[in-house]
Image (cartoon, rainbow, N blue to C red):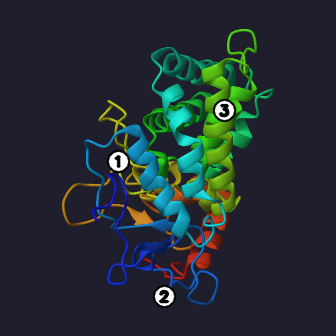
Amino acid sequence: MASPPGSINFTSNNPPQSYIHCGRCDDHFLICSCEGVGHGTDYIYKNLPPPSPNLTPLERLRRFSDLVSVSPTMKHFAAHMWLRNEAADLVTALTNEQAQAQLRQMMEEYIEMLSSKPEDLGLSQMANIVGSTPLTEKSPPEQVKVIATEGRAAIASFIACDWSTVTKAGILLIHTAFQVSDEQKYPIDDLNLGTIFNKGVDCLKSILDMGYSNTNFGWRLAMEPDRQPQGTNNSNIQSATRRDYFLRYYNSTHCQMCGKEEEEGGGSSLKMCAACRSVKYCNVECQKKHRKFHKKLCKEIERELMTTGSGGLELD
């Protein structure tokens, strides 16, 4: 008997465990050493068969439910029962054009409030969640820009029902946008908005809170972080991994002091910080000038690298 569209056909020869990896180090969970033993943490899925581009919203939710049901940390949520009993009403609400426009506008208004009332809206805390310490050291406008990218990606994936590509930080942004929205403009007793919040936003937030830790790693993860969201009608939305501000900072290719770009080609004109291996400098002089800005971040990244078993190497 053929599996319903959107289902992932796990079998004894193709078990879900073969796709489960540690979200911190990317290793298969059985060989991960983040916690000292092969258990992994903040589980994600890698190398799954890609979904068909022609899936309906309900079929995308079926894929999400399949993944939740076999997740070591999320399986306690009755995902298949939720799919049978709640998903149809939710999809009806999410495919309503007016409701979609309201959700997008709600996110834009929240982003604007972060710009105009950063202290009241907790901009620095949200920057730490979305981009860790590297983002908190940037200016408020730069912080808002990065948060806005994550919020817009989250709302697009949420509306498309491709929930396994929504990060824990992303659903928090959607949840917060609801909480601070104008009650007169977006009444929660509206049939569509009420259904979306209660059967969708609250539900997804609970699941991702169950699955991912409140750490700098956990907030930035999605169940399928390496896959580009589908059904969003926006090919510019990148995967969670490619959007990850911390990882992009970590893979920096310019001098952190003067901004000199690394030369193209094989040879490197910049030298890495030997402690955290996350930033580069032209020379010792640039490194010394930047030390007072980098000191706190350096220690945090070094701790994170040691947690994942990737640190401890000295570079010239």
Numbered marks: total: 3
* Above or below for 161 versus 104: below
Residue 316 placed where, x, y %?
A: 42, 77
Q: Quadrant of residue 308?
A: bottom right
Give the number of the disc on residue 60: none
Taking depth in this image into account, of 28 and 88 the one nearest to the observer is 88
Task: First in sequence, mark 3 or 1: give its number.
Answer: 3
Task: First in sequence, mark 1 or 2: give its number.
Answer: 2
* Above or below for 307 versus 167: below
Which residue is the extreme one toward the bottom?
37
Q: Which residue is mark 2?
A: 31
Residue drawn 63% across and 88% down?
36
Residue drawn 29% across and 35% down?
235
The mark closer to the camera, 3 or 1, is 3
Q: Amino acid at mark 1?
A: Gln
At mark 3, the secondary structure is helix
Q: Quadrant of residue 75?
A: bottom right
Task: First in sequence, mark 3 or 2: give its number.
Answer: 2
Residue 16 placed where, x, y %?
A: 43, 74
- Asked if labels 1 and 3 touch by Cβ distance under 8 angstroms, the answer is no
Give the number of the disc on residue 228: 1
Q: Which residue is mark 3?
A: 197
Residue drawn 72% across and 21% down?
188
